[in-house]
Structures are given as structure tokens and as C-alpha cells.
Image (cartoon, rainbow, N blue to C red):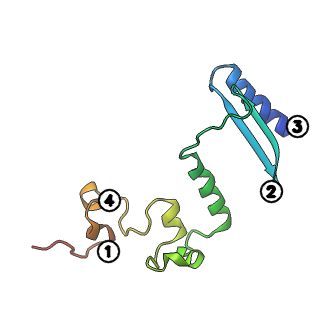
Amino acid sequence: MPEAVAKLVAFADAEVDEGRLPACQLALALDGEVVLRHTAGAPDDARFTTFSVTKAVTAAVAWMHLQPEQLVVDVLPEFADKPTVTVEHLLTHTAGFPRAPMPTEEAADPVARVTDPGVSHRSG
């Protein structure tokens, strides 16, 4: 086992042994194959729910392979009805809304969410 990997495993074990984590599970892949599986504080066949932690991993991969100003429609043709949304909009959770973030009242108004600043969108 390479030294850096051994350090990672030792760190995970220490986090569990010293009570900072109830359990920890690692998996490392190289060239598409899992080369290490390690579980501390739980049975080896335990499965952990990750919830939103995958968002950071997905964003990191996107930043590595896509350009912030790149139009999403150029990557995903299914976005044809949203032709101005960029990768940056998605990764910063603004999704092409012209004034995001915006006050809650405006965010709740479907017209206000997509209206350019300075354009009146309320009747009366």
C-alpha cells in the first residue's frame, strides 16, 4: 500500500478510535477499478448514506472539465428551453436567474425570477 494511502487509512481509523466519527468508510479507485475498500467502526459490508456530500464532488469534477461560461445546452441538448443557463449558473445555484440571489418575495414570484432587472413585471 502506498504511503499516502496508508496515512489516509490511519487517519480514518484514528477519527473513529478517538470518537470524532462513529464510523468511516473509504473506497479508492484507479483506472476505473476499486483498489481499496476500508471500513472503520462498522461491518465491512455496511453502507453509508451520503446525502448532499456528493454535490461537492460533482461540482469539483465539473470545474475540472467544463468552463464556467459554457452554455449548459452545449453539453446537454435537453436544456434547449433554457439556452442562456451556464455551467457557472448551475454550480453557484443561480440557474440563470438574472438577479439571484433575490428577496424571498421575488423568488416566490415565477415572473420575477426570470425577468431582467429594471423590467416591470407587476401589473397595476
Q: CA distance from mark 1 to mark 3?
A: 54 Å
Q: Position of residue 120 (x, y in %)?
A: 21, 75
Pick the residue in front: 33 or 65.
Answer: 33
Horizontal side of residue 100 vs 110, given as left or right? right
Q: Earlier in the sequence, mark 4 or mark 3?
A: 3
Q: Is residue 62 above or below residue 41?
A: below
Horizontal side of residue 27 vs 111, given as left or right? right
Mark 2 highlights which residue?
32
Q: Residues within 10 Å of mark 4 (few under 14, many from 20)?
A: some
Q: Position of residue 73 (x, y in %)?
A: 53, 77
Q: Position of residue 72 (x, y in %)?
A: 54, 73
Q: Earlier in the sequence, mark 1 or mark 4?
A: 4
- Please name the amino acid that badge 4 sits on: Met
Element class at badge 4: loop
Q: Which residue is depicted at the point 78% across and 33% down?
A: 9
Q: Earlier in the sequence, mark 1 or mark 3?
A: 3
- Please name the amino acid that badge 1 sits on: Asp
- Please name the amino acid that badge 3 sits on: Glu
Q: CA distance from mark 4 to mark 3?
A: 48 Å
Mark 3 highlights which residue?
3
Q: CA distance from mark 2 to mark 3?
A: 21 Å
Q: Earlier in the sequence, mark 4 or mark 2?
A: 2
Mark 1 highlights which residue?
116
Q: Which residue is depicted at the point 53% across and 47% down?
A: 52
Q: Are marks 1 and 2 in contact (CB under 8 Å)?
A: no
Q: Residues within 10 Å of mark 2 (few under 14, many from 20)?
A: few
Mark 4 highlights which residue?
102
- Please name the amino acid that badge 2 sits on: Gly
Give the label, 1 or 2, closer to the camera. 2
Give the label, 4 or 2, closer to the camera. 2
